[in-house]
Amino acid sequence: MSIRKGIKIFSLCLSLCLVLYPVSVVIADEEEPQEVTEQVEQSVEEAVVEEEVAPSDEAVPDENESAADDAEATVEPESEPEETEASEDGEMNVSSDDEDEVPEEEPEVSVISNAAIQIDGSASDWDNIHMLSASDANCIGWAVAKDKSNYYFCMWGNSVPLWFDVVYDDGTQWNANAIQLTWDSSAVKGGWYQDIPGSEAATGNGVTEFSVPADFFSNQNFTITYSGTSVTSADIPSASGSLPSIGGVSGGDTDEDIDTEIPDEDEEEEEETPVYNGIVIDSDFSDWAAVAKVNPESEAVDSAAMVFDGDYVYIYLSSSINYAVAGAGSHGNGKYEILTDLGGRLIFQVNNKANNRYCVDDSLVSGVDGVKAAYSDQIWGLDKYEYEIAIPASALPNYNKTISFGLYLGETFVFDVADMQGSEGGEFGGIVYDGQYNDWKFYPHTEIEYATPGTHEEVVDGEGALYSENGLLYGHVVTRMAPHLQEGGGEFAYAVTIRANDEYDFYPCLIAIDSAGNINWSPQLTGLDYGTYEFYIVDAQSWHTAKTLSELQSGDGPDKLFGQMYMTIGPSSDEMEFKVYIDKLAEKFGLDANDIKLLSAQFGRIGQQWIHTAGTSSAPWTGLGVCFAAVGGTMFCRRRKNRGTAV
């Protein structure tokens, strides 16, 4: 039995005897002896329990001292037991003139560890620590943090420098004036290459981490310099709480150094709602906190967002898989699109930039002039790979009110985003056949394409639309893709079909009329020089025997005039518009004009998609830029070769 335990038992027995001895004890306020007995029994039980459990930090009344006083004098009424001091380990201090002084055991201090950084070769716990620059080409950056017990260091890069200079404000010179790592970064050494007890080091995936105990430093007023960048100890951010006094600290903090205050549960901090203050393309993604994000179905993209402020369209993408954003889409090519409410598509590609991590690099995105882009990945402590992109509003296709964003010809991530400034693109005001095309800008179009989402081009094959009003069918097609521009007009002249009610087909044939009204049945239709041309439309299946325009217009002969087409050839785009008389189409098909409920068109040299318009000839028709199906094109130039020149 230990001396301390024996003294405890002796103290309790003495107290019990004094209480039960009726002559020596006076009970105040007529207190019943039974109650006193119960109190003593309870004290004994509590003492036994206390002996069995771990000692607490609360002060315990010194029973021996009270018992000794009771043995010499009668207890005064209403007197309270005299409190005694307790040791740090929770044991009662026993004082006695008759006993030898009991040597106190060394107190065991419980150190509270709040370390938020683990030395494991992963930077996942450094995302809230400011990164410092490094002059060494092999080091992308470094960071330092501290808590109550340690200083933590992290360097990003391969073959990074291994030496840290430490300069104290008071000029102290000793072996703590430097920190260095072994050649393989597996251990931490002091300035004299001495071991640093309690230090740790780890590497992994281009990250080097290590920690140094706080008591390694002579005092807490110093400056650390690494790879050309210095930081004072006062400016080192805290990993978990403030750093206590460093000089001479050994074996853990004392109770006074440890903040054990428990916050009031009722005093919960209110979470601040993020406020949108604009987006800056700088690899700092905190300004996206106020922007709502969506979770696409695409396995390559975990979240996406878009903001349109009138000057730029800002796009956010993230993925838990490295390089997945740059390989998204059905063809794995990272092709994305901004789709307007008029059907216009702006294609851009996110590129794989494996050697440019956490950087602002406009070459991350191709296909758009004036784009800005930035990227970060998990090497910087993030749990995802993130992109932010800014596309100039001037690069957008025509739109009316909103734009959407997603994979090119694939899943749309973000729908119907309007300009935050409240401005709109424009309104449709009807079509005038004049070869100017501006009146088509704000009319819905359908993409016409062969390239598919796997396209190697940065623009769509083409866009087309049909519009019908007052007995006329208007059509418009534009292409900006280089392979089609090489045709110089042939993309509009050949493989064109106009279909009525999804059943009756008309194959246009383009002819030229000179100033005298004479017909040229075989004009040049491909390889045209830059400029605007007008052609007349006849039936490719007719006899082609008319000599003049007036013969076509009279309608008396086998050849009839069905409409006209303007065609403009340019260095960056080819564009055309036509008008066709609906009553002539009905006459050809043996229908009444009112029986035509649906008109469609296909431009087979540009793509296989059909574009449509619907209505009746007795009232204005409404054009719908919707692609319903893709079917094979029809080459009409081989028809009736024995009856005229095919076009």
Image (tube, grey):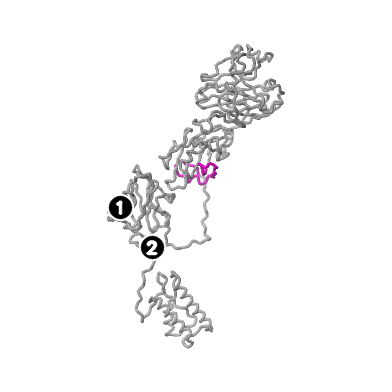
Residue 95 image point, x, y percent: 38, 78
Q: Nearer the viewer, residue 522 or 98?
A: 522
Element type at mark 2: loop
Q: Amino acid at mark 1?
A: Ala
Residue at numbered disc 2:
253
Residue 509 image point, x, y percent: 61, 19
Q: Amino acid at mark 2?
A: Asp
Horizontally, is 79 left or right of 513 in the view? left
Residue 413 image point, x, y percent: 55, 40
Q: Is residue 293 magenta?
A: yes
Q: Which of the labelled discs sits on residue 349, or is there none?
A: none
Element type at mark 1: strand
Tell me, yes or no, if residue 394 can be seen here: no
Label 2: how many Cα within 10 Å (few below 14, some 14–19, many 20+): some
Residue at left 45%, top 71%?
53
Tell me, yes or no, if residue 160 can be seen here: yes
Residue at numbered disc 1:
178
Name the quadrant of the N terminus: bottom left
Q: Main secondary structure of the magenta part?
A: loop
Q: CA distance from mark 2 to mark 1?
A: 24 Å
Q: Quadrant of residue 619?
A: top right
Q: Is residue 246 above or below residue 130?
A: below
Name the quadrant of the C terminus: top right
Q: Which residues are magenta?
A: 277-303
Residue at left 46%, top 38%?
373
Horizontally, is 449 left or right of 207 in the view? right
Residue 107 image point, x, y percent: 38, 68
Q: Is residue 454 above or below residue 645?
A: below
Q: Quadrant of residue 68?
A: bottom left
Q: Nearer the viewer, residue 633 or 397?
A: 633
Label 1: how many Cα within 10 Å (few below 14, some 14–19, many 20+): some
Outermost residue, bottom direction? Answer: 23
